[in-house]
């Protein structure tokens, strides 16, 4: 693999992922090559089963490739042990899932604080971080609410705040609007765009919703495990 340029956050080369299913090999990713630069908002689109989420999970260090290379933030994920990957993810990656994955017995504040419990921050410092990110996602007045007291859109905003609270280098979102109504989905996409534009966060969004491409700076399409040629999106101003 050639050395990435200083502003390259993700460099993927000839990446393959094969799943064994009922005695048959299923190719999820077929020799994918991808570069993502600092400050980009990349939207990965394609039909169900095209490999979008698989690619995102490999970039996040949640899943491993069958073959090929994946450099993220200068680290070769293929060479890392599971323990090293776990520490690396906590330091560098903020991941937003389709299902909010909030703990129902914890308040919004407590859910967002959880990743910080693994750091050396004091209780006061953790509280400052949590309040800041909840304000960023527009939930400064919902800190003491439990998930059951929030709408689906608000729950996803809590999940985004949780992903943001460690100030990650890379935010990865896997179908974050998939379980939301149109209005809530719009709100979530606006927040992601704000994080990109106002805070300079590098974001990779996986979605099958065509509205998603309106919010990114670059749109890439996958079809049957293959990444189609680059097609920059028209950024909405």
Image (cartoon, rainbow, N blue to C red):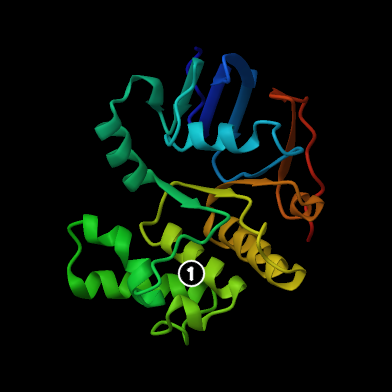
Please name the residue shown 78% across and 38% down the image.
232
Quadrant for residue 130, please give it.
bottom left
Q: Is residue 200 above or below residue 158?
A: above
Q: Is residue 181 above or below residue 215?
A: below
Q: Is residue 122 above or below residue 16?
A: below
Confirm whether residue 69 shows in the render. yes
Query: What is the number of callouts on the image?
Result: 1
Residue 105: x and y in percent read 35, 74
Give neighbour class at mark 1: few <14, some 14-19, many 20+ (Cα, 10 Å).
many
Please name the residue shown 73% across and 55% down the image.
215
Please name the residue shown 43% across and 36% down the image.
62
- Which residue is at the front of the view, 25 or 177? 25
On screen, residue 77 versus residue 3, left or right, reads left
- Which residue is at the front of the view, 85 or 234? 85
Q: Is residue 68 above or below residue 113?
A: above
Residue 133: x and y in percent read 44, 70
- Which residue is at the front of the view, 57 or 233? 57
On screen, residue 64 versus residue 82, left or right, reads right
On screen, residue 25 versus residue 225, left or right, reads left
Identify residue for label 1.
158
Q: Quarter holding the C terminus?
A: bottom right
Residue 11: x and y in percent read 53, 25
Task: Pick out the residue farthest to the bottom.
Answer: 141
Under circle 1, the secondary element is helix
């Amino acid at each position: 693999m050639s050395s990435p340029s200083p502003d390259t956050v993700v460099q993927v080369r000839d990446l393959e992922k094969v799943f064994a299913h009922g005695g048959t090999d299923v190719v999820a990713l077929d020799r994918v090559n991808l570069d993502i630069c600092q400050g980009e908002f990349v939207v990965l689109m394609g039909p169900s089963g095209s490999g979008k989420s698989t690619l995102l999970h490999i970039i996040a260090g949640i899943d491993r490739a069958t073959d090929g290379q994946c450099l993220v933030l200068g680290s070769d994920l293929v060479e890392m042990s599971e323990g090293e990957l776990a520490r690396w993810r906590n330091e560098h990656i903020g991941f937003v899932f389709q299902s909010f994955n909030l703990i129902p017995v914890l308040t919004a504040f407590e859910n967002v604080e959880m990743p910080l419990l693994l750091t050396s921050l004091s209780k006061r410092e953790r509280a400052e971080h949590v309040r800041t990110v909840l304000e960023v996602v527009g939930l400064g007045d919902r800190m003491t609410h439990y998930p059951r007291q929030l709408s689906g859109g608000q729950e996803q905003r809590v999940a985004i705040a949780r992903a943001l609270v460690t100030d990650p280098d890379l935010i990865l979102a896997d179908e974050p609007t998939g379980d939301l109504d149109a209005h809530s989905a719009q709100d979530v996409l606006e927040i992601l765009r704000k994080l990109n534009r106002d805070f300079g966060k590098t974001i990779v969004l996986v979605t099958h919703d065509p509205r998603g491409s309106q919010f990114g700076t670059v749109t890439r399409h996958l079809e049957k495990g293959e990444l189609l040629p680059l097609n920059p999106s028209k950024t909405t101003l």
